[in-house]
Amino acid sequence: MLRWQIPLQEYRGNITFLHKDGNIHKNSDVLSRCPLPNDIHHPAYVPEEASPQIPIEGISVTDLNTTFFEEVQNSYTQDKSCRILFQLLNKDCKDSSLIHALDEV
């Protein structure tokens, strides 16, 4: 409807529009359903918003071996800093000696 509003404004008052139900009006105008190009010469032109394009540098999916995950998990228990952090996180009370032990590591 928007594409016809501007061209038909000059005929306001001299034209009457009638709606014909689709069940009664079997030979509908196919051209009226055809979309018009969105260019500056068309009265219903809508400028397209330029969306920022961010290039994807690369996507990598790797399937790692379970032994790698086990090594990482075991290394947490062997690392002194991680052991102290685990102890601090598991305790409700704050042990200042453990907190100061992190500075020594």
Image (tube, helix red, strand yellow):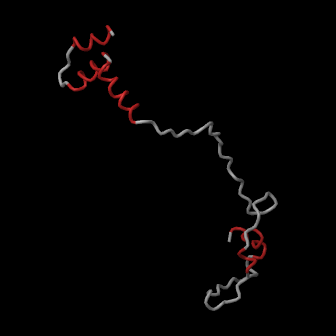
Q: Residue at x 65, y 46 (%)?
A: 51
Q: Residue at x 62, y 39 (%)?
A: 56
Q: Residue at x 33, y 23 (%)?
A: 76
Q: Quadrant of the N terminus?
A: bottom right
Q: Give residue 42's position: percent from left, percent from top.
A: 79, 63
Q: Give residue 40's position: percent from left, percent from top.
A: 79, 57
In the orientation shown, which residue stands out farthest toward the bottom?
Answer: 24
90 on left or right of 58: left
Q: Quadrant of the C terminus?
A: top left
In the orientation shown, which residue stands out farthest toward the right?
Answer: 41
Q: Give residue 85's position: percent from left, percent from top.
A: 28, 21
89 on left or right of 6: left
Residue 38 falls in which quadrant of the image? Answer: bottom right
Residue 65 falls in which quadrant of the image? Answer: top left
In the orientation shown, which residue stands out farthest toward the left?
Answer: 93
Above-or-below relation of 85 to 18? above
Q: Nearer the viewer, residue 92 or 46?
A: 92
